[in-house]
Amino acid sequence: MRILLTNDDGIHAEGLVALEKIARQLSGDVFVCAPEYEQSGASRALTLADPVRVRKIDEARYATTGTPTDCVMLAVNELMGGKSPDLVLSGVNRGANLAEDVTLSGTVAGAIEGMALGIPSIALSQTNWAVEGQDMFAPAETFAAGVVAKLVETGWPKDVILNVNFPARPLADIVEVEVTRQTFRDVQIRHAEKRTDLRNREYYWMGFRQERSRPEPGTDLAAIYEGKISVTPLHIDLTHMPTVHALKGVLGGAPPRGVA
């Protein structure tokens, strides 16, 4: 099995080191293509207005100035010598990718690009709350290979990616995997903090508040709060079918002209 690795935290990220350890438990054929610099929050951005430069680190390891989407596309179409991967793994992200954040995540986007190219793809993220005496990525490094192997053995639809999140808990306390659905937070955690630079000019720093939501059981957030490994099947068909059916009776037929 040939595995392509990417991320959004960059080629030097500790999470990518963790992902390589995970991948090498599954295969001896591992190829890495990751952003030269951090691309968190890039979502599915494709670099169109600037050139994307590629730095070859060794025969199976590349860094690019592009986004995670750029990295996967370039790896599959240009850098892997015509031998496409059998699996794309994106991560391990520093911090969970849950709820509405999945639409912002470059980690999830890397997996989506793999799926769009016809390759089974999984996004992996590690909740980064501190656990005393334990490396942050220890849960992912301990459990991810087993979870991924089971998922690959089972299979999933071609238009779906799997979003796997690991809790920040002592390893002995992580005893359950839950297949979950994506949820939405009931609190707003994204915010912009206004600051002033040394030339007395104002700027804003975007970030997230550490405020917990109150999710329903069976959701990705609830599973992580409960110390479980969350596995969420995601797809990019954003069509809301109930509204499609509701609007067909209103807008079906000839288009309306003007407003009376």
Image (cartoon, rainbow, N blue to C red):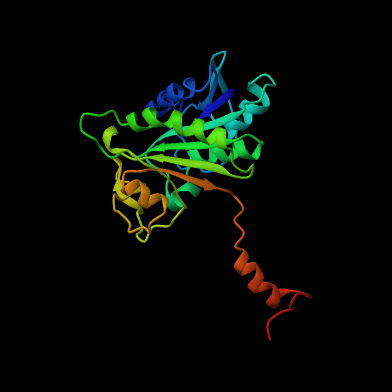
Say left or right for 79 vs 217. Answer: right
Say left or right for 57 vs 114. Answer: left
Instruction: Tell me which residue sits at (48%, 26%) in the image.
Output: 36
Instruction: Tell me which residue sits at (59%, 31%) in the image.
Output: 72
Marks counted in the figure total 0
Nearer the observer, 213 or 52: 213
| Percent x, y of residue 117 | 66, 36
Nearer the observer, 228 or 17: 228
- In the depicted structure, whether residue 221 falls above or below residue 93: below
| Percent x, y of residue 245 | 66, 70
Say left or right for 216 vs 195. Answer: right
Looking at the rendering, in which quadrant would you find the N terminus?
Answer: top right
- In the depicted structure, whether residue 138 falls above or below residue 178: above
Q: Is residue 25 visible?
A: yes
Nearer the observer, 237 or 188: 237
Residue positioned most to the bottom: 260
Looking at the rendering, in which quadrant would you find the C terminus?
Answer: bottom right
Residue positioned most to the right: 254
Q: Is residue 42 visible?
A: no
Say left or right for 13 vs 155. Answer: left
Instruction: Tell me which residue sits at (47%, 36%) in the image.
Output: 39
| Percent x, y of residue 35 | 50, 29
- In the depicted structure, whether residue 96 falls above or below residue 23: below
Q: Quadrant location of residue 134? A: top left
| Percent x, y of residue 59 | 57, 13
Residue positioned most to the top: 58
